[in-house]
Image (cartoon, helix red, strand yellow):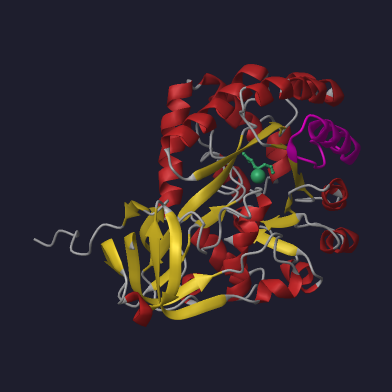
Amino acid sequence: MTYDLLVYNIGQLILPKCSSKPLKGDEMKELLVKEKAAFAISDGKVAWIGSDGDAQHLTARETVNVQGKVVSPGLVDPHTHLVFGGSREHELALKQAGVPYLEILARGGGILSSVEATKKATLEELMMKASFHLERMISFGVTAVEAKSGYGLDRETELKQLRVTKQLQERYPVQLVSTFLGAHAVPSGYKGSEALFLDEMIDLLDEIKEEQLAEYVDIFCETGVFTLDQSRNFLRKALDKGFGIKIHADEIDPLGGTELAASLGAASADHLVAASDHGINSLSESETVAVLLPGTTFYLGKDHYARAREMIDGGAAVALATDFNPGSCVTENLQLIMSLAALKLKMTAEEIWNAVTVNAAFAIGKGTEAGTLEPGKQADFVIWDVPNYLYIPYHYGVNHAEQVYCKGNKLWERAAYGAVQLS
Ligand code: NIG
Ligand code: FE
């Protein structure tokens, strides 16, 4: 047979384990790195994987010579706040002056300032801005992205944000998973009436379901935002309405959101910097993926990072994400997060690759579709301009992606060297 595309002369082909469940504990330490490999694609799907030697007997309409570089599945970013209006560079000076993140929020800034900007922006403006950020994510090797709402906190603006994500899903071939985060902050008029506000957000779920605007519902369970009881109540109602659930848990104070996520069967519990020993244990007994966001800890200037070692060594499933947002982590670069995971979370290179591919895919309910390469799966992959798979966490802060493919088609390519104008 003649394949559509043959990718050959691959120095290292990164093949995270294909599984029906997220990789937990010791499973995260294993990573198949196939040397001198090749693979073929037909109809946007992987059709064959084998050795470079065997590939010479195959025929294909198009070929890509990888020249001994590294190829991996497309990365998956399972926690982003992709759609928002405005920006918050003025808050950097407050952070430098030592004003804590929750204090900025309590003064009506932080998330609430992005809410104001998002209310003012038109759908078209939000679409242009989110497209820009999404394209940058793609350029960093990401082919599946979760996108949260949560900068509206009222019916009209939340729906506007979710509709932007839906339009992005229609325009771009990458997988976009939409999450309704109406419970992201308490709007100024609702201080003391949090339960009433949460009921209003729950009331939107039928409309969201009908218009197919989100698959997941999320809540920010934190001191000064929503309590553990409010979060439990809210997430149970979301489950009853047929949504998957996620939770911003134990980011700053250990309220017990980690345990709550595990007990409710959430797809993911995110942040977990302050998770208790009990919380960490509860993860290992569940299928809930711990989505760690070291870029946020770094950007908020904290000394203590999430206890990834204890989570993995204790048997939990860990994924990594950017948490891209205008306040607590302003970067689209998942490769930078891989470096922070190595340096600050003490994760091994094998664990890191599993955390940005297969486990990240399970955190957004796409574990059997994204994050791995095997015959029959969608051909989303990245050609990396690096000598081996250890190199990306090592050489930090830059973009190592050379070409990004989605469904077997080239979606992005780095500008050629020689683009610098020497006169
Ligand atoms: O995941 N923690 C809450 N929400 C976001 C921050 C959003 C913002 O500051 O705009 C986060 O870090
Ligand atoms: Fe977040």
Quarter of the image with the C terminus is bottom left
User: x, y (%) of residue 200?
Assistant: 77, 20
Residue 386 in the image: above or below residue 257 = below
Left or right: residue 345 compared with residue 134 = right
Residue drawn at x 51%, y 77% as measured from the top left? 33
Within the image, what quadrant is residue 395 found in?
bottom left
User: x, y (%) of residue 414?
Assistant: 30, 58
Residue 169 in the image: above or below residue 411 = above
Observer-nearest of 74 and 261: 74
Left or right: residue 239 compared with residue 161 = right
The reply to whether the magenta stretch includes residue 263 is no
Residue 379 in the image: above or below residue 14 = above
Residue drawn at x 70%, y 66% as measured from the top left? 23
Left or right: residue 2 compared with residue 177 = left
Residue range highlighted in magenta: 220-244
Q: Is residue 116 visible?
A: yes
Which residue in the rendered view is the most extreme toward the front?
1
Quarter of the image with the N terminus is bottom left
User: x, y (%) of residue 38?
Assistant: 39, 73
Q: How many marks?
A: 0
Within the image, what quadrant is residue 217 found in?
top right
Quadrant location, ligand no. 1? top right
Q: Is residue 305 visible?
A: no
User: x, y (%) of residue 204?
Assistant: 72, 21
Residue 340 in the image: above or below residue 216 = below
